[in-house]
Image (spheres, coloured by chain):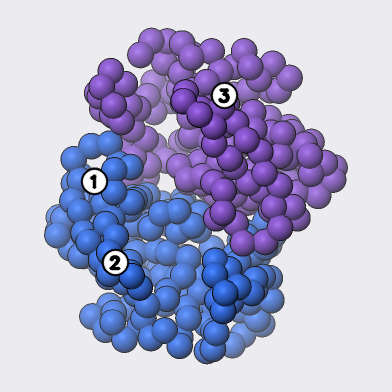
Chain colours: A blue, B purple
Amino acid sequence: MNTERRTLASVIRTVPDFPKKGIMFRDITTLLKDPEAFREAVDIFCSRYADQRIDKIVCVESRGFILGAAIALRLNAGFVPIRKKGKLPAATLRQEYALEYGTDVIEIHQDAVSPGERVLMHDDLLATGGTISAACKLVENLGGTIAGLSFLIELNFLKGRAKLGAYDVFSIIQYDAE
Amino acid sequence: MNTERRTLASVIRTVPDFPKKGIMFRDITTLLKDPEAFREAVDIFCSRYADQRIDKIVCVESRGFILGAAIALRLNAGFVPIRKKGKLPAATLRQEYALEYGTDVIEIHQDAVSPGERVLMHDDLLATGGTISAACKLVENLGGTIAGLSFLIELNFLKGRAKLGAYDVFSIIQYDAE
């Protein structure tokens, strides 16, 4: 790990027992409110993808919107939101995915990605990988080519990366244990 | 209206009867997915606030996160989210505000803004002004100084601006009628 990444990890706040007992919640708001840390994170993502001719950044609601929008601006790419069911106003594609208990549904606008466009996926956190897998299906169903999956944080012990073997997965900060 | 602003208005999509019958929904996703339009919007905001020594951009969940994060990056300011009740993990301040029917609650982290910091508020849309008024109270209760309120879209006919007389209010695109 280089110095830059150590610095970024040090501005993540860990909140015990949120949203429920036993969960160590990794709070990115302490990084986002720090202009230097925020810019460093964006710089790391952008240096990785700068040469990959990214057309669109597809971001998962809602924390994924934050760094995703900054990356889109810097890479001169379009920004595309993936949202929970019923939030997007025009014609959508929907994808169901499994939660710990039950299922949830995310949507993308049908005209958000054009066939052949190169797409960088972004979310703040890679946990079990369920949401981002569903998001990738949506983009591929629109004909997009997924250039990579990018996360600020990866929870290694949840093994989400194993579910995403078909893709290039990148994260800046990793946690090996809860 | 200058040419740049006409161009931005032309990439907003209007979706009739969303989220319910009779509402003309102004959909910003068609602007966000267009890299030039996205950058133009950010440029307009940043040229307005570049000389105002903005420390933090405080943004309302979740569409407000998108342009707000891009503005924060460009102005070298910190990004602060205001979220619905129960989403922020650490100690918060809460503010209730009126909806058409009933009330809702938004929150900010208590350590998100320090006393004396200069804050730019951002949301995608100014409608009746209820949410942004509540958001301003939160920032002021933390001791922040509100330098301005910024919106991509303003629905003039809902007269939100009249409720915000104490502040400098700026919007890029205005609609005079539903």
Residue B150 in view (yes/no): no
Q: Is residue A130 left or right of residue A176?
A: left
Q: Report the amino acid beneath label 3.
A: Gly
Instruction: Identify the element where label 2 is drawn.
Output: loop
Q: Which residue is mark 1?
A: A109
Of residue A155 and residue B170, the one placed in the foreground of this image is A155
Q: Do discs 1 and 3 belong to a common subunit?
A: no
For image coordinates 27% across by 36% down, the residue present is A89
Of residue B137 and residue A116, the one placed in the foreground of this image is B137
* Sequence order check, earlier mark of 2 and 1: 2
Q: Report the amino acid beneath label 1.
A: His
**Labels 3 & 2 near each other (Cβ < 8 A):** no
Q: Position of residue A108 (x, y in %)?
A: 25, 50
Instruction: Identify the element where label 3 is drawn.
Output: loop
From mark 2 to mark 1, how far is it between C-alphas?
A: 24 Å
Q: Please identify the residue farthest to the right as the structure is shown.
A: B116
Instruction: Identify the element where label 1 is drawn.
Output: strand
Q: Which mark is residue A102?
A: 2
Q: Which residue is mark 3?
A: B129
Name the subunit of mark 1.
A
Of badges 2 and 1, the one in the foreground is 2
Within 10 Å of disc 3 (Cα), the crowding (few <14, some 14-19, many 20+) is some
Would you identify the image quadrant in which residue A160 lies?
bottom left
Q: Position of residue B30 (x, y in %)?
A: 31, 37
For image coordinates 66% across by 38% down, the residue present is B95
For image coordinates 69% across by 76% down, the residue present is A10
Of residue A12 and residue B173, the one placed in the foreground of this image is A12
